[in-house]
Every structure is written in structure tokens, then in C-alpha cells.
Amino acid sequence: MQRDEYGWLRSAIARFGASCKQKLSGGGSPEASIRGPLEVLLQTVGEHHKQHEVTWHDEYALRDLGVRPDYAVRAGQDIIGYIELKRPGLSVDPETFGKSNREQWEKLRDLPNLLYSNGTEWRLFRDGRQIGETVLFAGHLKSTGEKLSAADPAAFDALLKQFLMWKPEPITQVARLVQHVAPLCRLLRAAVVEQLSAEAKSPAPDDDMRARPFTGLKNDWRRYLFPSADDATFADGYAQTVTFALLLARTEDIPLKPDSFHEIGRGLDADHALMGKALQLLTDNVNERFTVTLDLLTRTIAKVVWPAIRSGNRDAYLHLYEHFLTVYDPMLRQKSGSYYTPREVVEEMVRLTEDVLRTRLDQELGFAAEEVRIVDPAMGTGTFLHTIIERVAEQAVERHGPAMARDAISRLASRLFGFELQMGPFAVSELRASDLLKKYKVPLPQGGLNLFVTDTLDNPYVEEEYLASTYGALSL
């Protein structure tokens, strides 16, 4: 007699069906009636796979998002996923959702591990994408009872294993980095919008940082950095700054732990002062509304393996921000004009500029000449500056041998200047520039690179009348 590998699961589903039928016959809320049987079913699967530390938290409020999924699932100390349960018979396909369920879905969709079910239909979502096929049970919860069965018990078992055993995995490719980090950045942006909305209802004055911390941050952001920034623009700037500061910290091997943002910022401060100060200032006043999102973001970025991402991929950084925006907010990418210039075009433009330096400005050494200052007024992710670094290094090797590349780059670093309006591209530019200097074993110039977050088109003759105390550190 052949052994039934999934006999235990068939029995668990039968018990689930019988329990649901009994509960639903009592006349209570259909959705609430199947909660208890669902917990037993999932607990059985967890124990079968030796996942004994699983606990369930009912009606778990995600203050970050202003939404309350039916369950948060914890394994050990960490929340590993969320469950949204619908009444029996109601489809859990997001394409079919009505207004209220659609609004809830829009708030939940970016979570990295989300299970939707109505008791007979099961769908697993990660970062807004369904993982695997939909699993269906044969029968109706109200009438089928112990004859309830899974059309494919192996697929149901696999789906629940994926859900219950989720944890951030090592990220070794740019595509996977973007796929996992961009939705969490979008979650953080939504959390800031929710916080600003909550603060707008407060009777406290705008400058009461205890009652309205993010309103104060937003006002400082507008007055000192971006005068035209509305709530949505500030929320976007906040989310991207925190996300890319953490990515920058990861490339510097600074330990990333939840609730340690001040220490992370201090670690960045030595070589990346602006991003370090920004991370500290923007996270000093976070409250419980941000706990879930910041924890997920930090845990995920801690799994980024930069050496593997960079290995054998010269253009890893070139496409990073453009791909990020494509997932994070395609409309923002179009609005901001964030499209990369192909490397072949950049290299040719750099070559032509150097030819002008030599033939018309009498700078025989081109970009390597001490008298030459290189300024990119809209550097984006820094491709032009990075190409110049590589060109000067290659020429030094050709003229004097490999040992001279380090000296040439060391003298070049303090003569490079870049201006960028957006914090995300600015951070990517710093990532790439720092990596290049490390490649040639060149320390960063004292005080860091001459890269600045600013609007090149601002009037340079307008005297700054207001310098926000919270942003004073960023002006150094």
C-alpha cells in the first residue's frame, strides 16, 4: 500500500471544514466564524514543519499604513507576515475588489509576506505580486463539512510553508534589490503621509515638535531645501532619503539593526556627512506609527550583499536608480526626468570634453591637470563624474604604470564637484564614487566628496533668511 504523503494535511483540512460548518451554523459573523478553525489549520501546518514558535496576533494595527490586517504572524521575536481574511465566498483576487477592499489592498500590497484567504481560496503576495498559483478547496464552508478538500494538497502545503517560513534572503542582484526595497520605500512614504494627516488634525501649533514632529520637519524641509515641497513631495523625499542612507550604510558595512538609526547615521557621518546627518534628523522623532515599516526596511537592506551585486557588473549602479523609480513610482520617474545616459554616450562626451581641454585650453593632462575643476550641475547618479575618475586612472596606468593610478585619483578627488536636487540619486552617486575610490585604494578627501544636494538653478545672490535649526547640520 502506497503511503499518503499528505494524509496529515487532508485530515487537517477535513477538520477545518467540519469546524467551519459548525461555526457558520450559529448565525454569527461569517468572517469571524472561520477565524478559530483557520488558526488551528495553520498551527497544524507549522507544527508539521517544526515551526513551533509561530504565534498569531489578532487585528494587528499597522499604524504606519492606517490599516488593520486580521492577523500578524510572529516567529520567535520577528513578525514574519500578515493575514487578511475575507468572508466565505468573497473573492480574494485584488482585481475583483470593491471600493473598501481595494483601498485596504492598496495599503497592504507592498508588504513582503501577505496571505489572503476566504477559507477556500488562498493567495500569497509579496511586494504586491502574487507568488505561485491560487490554491482552491473543493466544497463550501457552510455545507461541505469534513468532506472539504484541497484540489492540490501539495500546492497548499508549499504555499503555507512559503508563508510561515519567510525571512529576508540575501540580495545579490540589482533587480532583486529594487524588487524588495522599492515597495518598502513606498510603504514608508505612505506612513509619512498618514502621519502628516494625523498631525494636521492636532490643535497644537506647527512648531510644537512633540505634538507635530513631522509637520516641523516638513516645514524645515521646505524652507531650507525645497521651497515648493507639499506633503506628498516631503513624504517622498523622506522615504527616499532614509532608504538610500541605509543602502549607503550597508555598503560601508555599518551594522543595521532596527531602532539604531542614530548610531547608523553616526557611522555614516565620517565619510558621508550629509546622508548621515539626514538619517539622524529624519528618524529622531519617529513614533510607533513607523515601527513595522522601518523594521522591515532595515531587516531587508541588512541582507543586501554589495560585493556580489558589484561583482562582474560594471553598470550595477548605472541602472539602479532608474530601475528603483520604475518599481517605486513610474510617474515620478517621468516627472523628474530620471533616465540614465547610456555609458557609450557618456564616455564619448567625456572624451570630447577632454579634447577641448587639451587643444583649446592648453591642459595637456586633461582632467588630470591640477588646474582643472570638474563640475556636474545636475549629476543624477554621478555617471559623468565616475567616468572621469575611471578615465584618469586608466591614463595614469598607461603613462606611468599601475602604481600611479592611486596617486592620480587621490589628487583628482578633491577637484570633483557635483550638484543634485534629489536625495536618492545623490546617495547612489556617493555609493559609486566611494566604491571607485576603494577600488583604487584611495581614501575619501577630508570632509568627504564635494557632492551637494541643491538646486543649481536657484538664485545665488538671494541671502538665506531662515536656517532651520534641525537642518543646520546639513549646511556644513
Image (cartoon, helix red, strand yellow):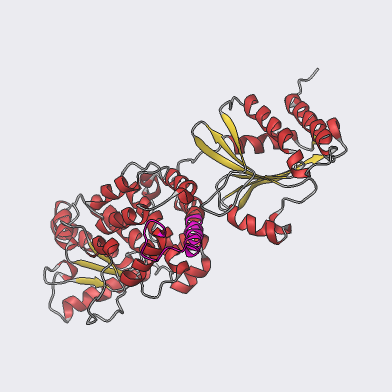
In the image, residue 215 sits, relative to residue 259, either above or below, namely: below
The C terminus - image quarter: bottom left
Q: Is residue 412 left or right of residue 92?
A: left
Give residue 364's position: percent from left, percent from top. Answer: 13, 72
Magenta extent? 186-212
Say if the magenta span includes residue 311. no
Q: Residue furthest front?
A: 203
On screen, residue 136 versus residue 307, left or right, reads: right
Residue pictured at 58% horizontal, 27% vertical: 51
Q: Position of residue 99 (x, y in %)?
A: 70, 62
In the picture provided, is 382 more to the left or to the right than 148? left
Residue 476 visible in the current orientation = yes
From this viewpoint, is residue 320 visible?
no
Count of numbered circles in the view: 0
Q: Tell me: 113 left or right of 340.
A: right
Residue 2, above or below 246 = above
**Residue lying at the far top of the rendered structure:** 1
Residue at 40 percent across and 68 percent down: it is: 342
When the figure is inspected, residue 136 is found, relative to residue 331, above or below; the finding is above
Q: Position of residue 340 (x, y in %)?
A: 41, 68
Quadrant where the N terminus lies? top right
Residue in front for this viewpoint, 365 or 339 = 339
Of residue 7 and residue 242, the one placed in the foreground of this image is: 242
* Nearer-the-camera pick, 282 or 406: 282
Give percent across and percent down for residue 134: 72, 46
Look at 76% across and 37% down and name the residue there: 152
> Which picture quadrant has residue 217?
bottom left
Q: Is residue 189 magenta?
A: yes
Residue at 76% in and 23% down:
4
